[in-house]
Image (cartoon, grey):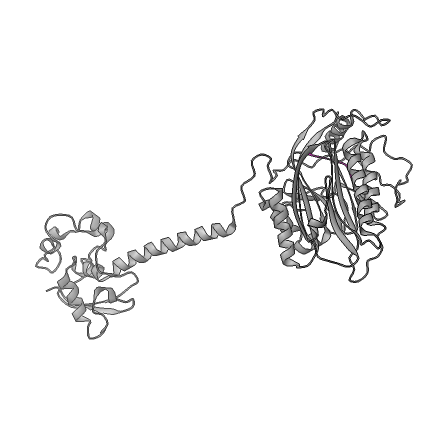
Amino acid sequence: MARTARISTTVTARYSPAPGVRDAFWLDGRLSGRREARAADITLDREDRGAFFAVFARPAPAGDAEADAAALRRTLERMDNEVKRTGRNIDTEINELADCAVEVCGRISLSQEGVRSPYFAGIIVKDNEVAAVTLGGGCAYLYRGDALYPLTGDDFELEPVDALGNVVHNLEAYCAGTAGTVRYSNIAPLLPDDCLVVCNREVMETLGQKEVLRLLYEAEDQCDAAGLIATSAAAKAPGLPIQFMIGFTEAVNSGERGLRPAAGRPERIGASASYAAAGAAAAAGAEGAEGADDAPTDGVYRGPSEVPAVATKRTAPPPPRPDRFRSGARRRPAIDPRTIALVIVVIGISVGAVFALLRILDFGGNPSPTATPSAGPTAEATLEPTGEGTPSAEATPTKSDELATPTPDPATPTGSAETYTVKAGDTLWAICIKFYGKYSETLAQGILDANAEQYPTFTSADKIQKGWVLTIPPQQ
């Protein structure tokens, strides 16, 4: 039964003239052309049984450029038709993809100084299974659950961590091996929300794994991810040729599409079922099933490169992990740490302003609202001193005064001058309450007058300073 997948793919590229090679891409049937001579930003959303995307750089044509471009298109279209319309399974298509890579790039030799080498990174999808081939500086990845899994063993080494710094086990489970200059992947299942990535190695070397993971994590969809990564790489390395293609799997379907196998090539029935069994065994700790029974067994890679074939196998997916992209409704961007910092700063400023306002009111000599005497006789009328020089019983502060102001010290004599060292937070109002048991303008002015000679700046209630030793005159 033919299985289909809906994949939304975006390619973003920044090209710069370079001697020796020409960068280009193949986007599931579309070859980059003159309109993409300097830059590209294209998105394709399509559902089909098979798909083929690739980014590459090939040697500049030595002769007729138009004839060379036509030959290139025929090679890529042949691969595209193989993936979409033949009844063969993906095991055989991997060899066809390797043939295509070698035809596009030619034989890769040692690079010369100042001259870029050709590269190829291609991914095929067929019946909801994925495989990849890379050459030279091409990179192919599977982004699943915040982790970037290499599909082939390229030269850019990845740390086994995801975008959040968590350890990722079996990071290289999808890498199969090499055959000459061709690097193969194992066959992986395609799951909803998977992202397929191909790019040139310069992108990874310029940004680094952690930066690429961060941008993928913060992106809203594959269009946003491709734009962020290409823009960041171009900003860090101006003039560097950049190609980044990412396909987001919106849906995976198992319904029959009415596609018929090619003549003489009956479609294998039960391939997906056998893979499901292999996946279950791998999840239980067993090794995945080997390649299909109709895969090449003669040990010879049948292609222009004439390199030995690599045995591939189907690999079970790693444990499920929450992915950042969602089909249908796009994920909201992660909260920007700068926004959190700004909120904290605003809260801090607001709290500081409130405390500053309260302190200004306190130093102004006005009692706080909680310390306002209760209604009835005024403080001066009810807090008359007794004959012994201490406040009478009628002068007992109210309950609110006890909570908001210092309680008068009964042991403090009021018949002779005293001294008092000002402490942090003291006010003239509080000092009057402490020594006289009440506050009035007359008492406050008496303290000001008694200390005018020693502290000339002490002319009002808000001029009081910590550390002053004030003379407290007796109550008149």
* In the rendered image, the vertical position of residue 65 relative to residue 279, given as above or below: below
Q: At which x and y percent is residue 45?
A: 65, 37
Q: At which x and y percent is residue 296?
A: 88, 35
Residue 87 as seen in the image, left or right of residue 7: right
Residue 389 as seen in the image, left or right of residue 403: left
* In the rendered image, the vertical position of residue 108 relative to residue 187, given as above or below: below
Q: Closest to the observer: 87 or 61?
A: 61
Q: Closest to the observer: 287 or 179?
A: 179
Which residue extends farthest bottom?
A: 453
Residue 456 as seen in the image, left or right of residue 57: left
Q: Closest to the observer: 389 or 303?
A: 303
Q: Total label count?
A: 0
Type of secondary structure dominating the magenta stretch = loop
Answer with the quarter of the image where residue 452 lies: bottom left
Going 30% across and 57% down the picture, which residue do you hit?
357
Q: At which x and y percent is residue 179?
A: 85, 45
Which residue extends farthest left?
A: 387
Write down the region rendered in magenta. Answer: 186-190
User: Was residue 189 drawn as part of the magenta stretch in this picture?
Assistant: yes
